[in-house]
Image (tube, grey):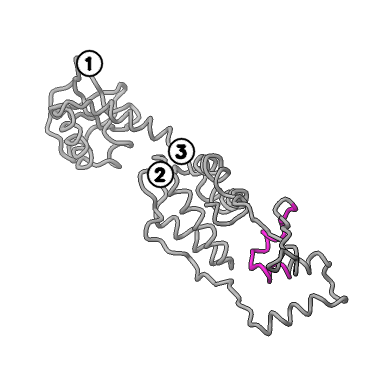
Amino acid sequence: MAKATRFTDRFIASLKPEKREYWKREGQGFAIRVLPSGEKIWYFVYTFEGRKRYMRLKAGGYPDVTLANAREAFDAARVKLANGVDPLAEKEQAAEERRKAPTVADLVGEYITRHAKLFKRSWAKDEQILNREVVPAWGNRKAADIEKGDVIRLCEGIVTRGAPAMANNTFQIIRKMLNWAVEKNILKTTPCVGVKLPAPKNSRDRLLAADEIRTLWESLDRTDLSITPDICRALKLILVTGQRPNEVAGLHSSEIAVEHREDKDSKGNIIREWDETWWTLPVARQKVSKA
């Protein structure tokens, strides 16, 4: 290698390509490699545990990587070396971890398989929304690269196209997936922290007054309705029990038990008897049993 020279912007700019590559060194391992193509690449040349090491300081070459930027990277690498760390080995390990880091598409697959399918009855809907709304936009990006602004822009875009409820659903699923990734140490942090629902959440609650319940009940007894008798009975059962429509619709005979009851006088004579019907809703069919 050539004799050490103090680098300046003027000196680096003056370096011309030759038929064969050559090196210029400033000292302490700070060097620049000039290729026949004219490309100028910054390096830290050092020895670690008896091995000569050539560490490229920055991706890209001069002038895109300025002398100031290269010197900053060189100083940081030299500090690591002084503390017994091989900066090139550390850089290579970080690059390998980066290569293996999951993309958003990878994370979606893991989340659905390892969490949603096991703990959410709505996993198929989650998978559909993620594959339709999230994977086309972020699928090839590393999950760790997704930032708060990306989440906000994606969800606001869904609102803009006239689907505010879908925007809220998408955000909630993204938030759940990224929180799960943090819990499983796949990600260090989640960009959803501090992000609110992208659209106002409209309540679906509708409380019927007593006269409205009476009117509905009496209407279900009419014979000219366009709905089947089974649906009429299901609606009445919803009114009587206060259970969710899907729980009533999924009612199975195994959930029903009939108990015979009797009232007796002081002499043991039966004065009244009746049957009581009990419906026991299994925990697996209750909404509160699923995340």
Q: Secondary structure at mark 3?
A: loop
**First in sequence: mark 2 or mark 1?**
1
Q: Is residue 67 above or below residue 208?
A: above
Alpha carbon of mark 2 to alpha carbon of mark 3: how far? Answer: 15 Å
Magenta-tinted stretch: 236-253
Chain-order first, disc 3 or disc 1: 1
Farthest top residue?
Answer: 50
- Circle 3 residues within 10 Å: few <14, some 14–19, many ≥20: many
Mark identifier at residue 51: 1
For residue 213, side relative to residue 288 (left or right): right
Q: Is residue 96 visible?
A: yes
Residue drawn at point x = 25 percent, y = 32 percent: 42
291 and 25: which one is in front? Answer: 291
Pointers 2 and 1 in contact (CB under 8 A)?
Answer: no
Above/below status of 192 relative to 101: below
x, y percentage for residue 88?
27, 27
Q: Is residue 106 above or below residue 280?
A: above
Location of mark 2 (residue): 183
Classify residue 69 by image quadrant. Answer: top left
Q: Main secondary structure of the magenta part?
A: helix
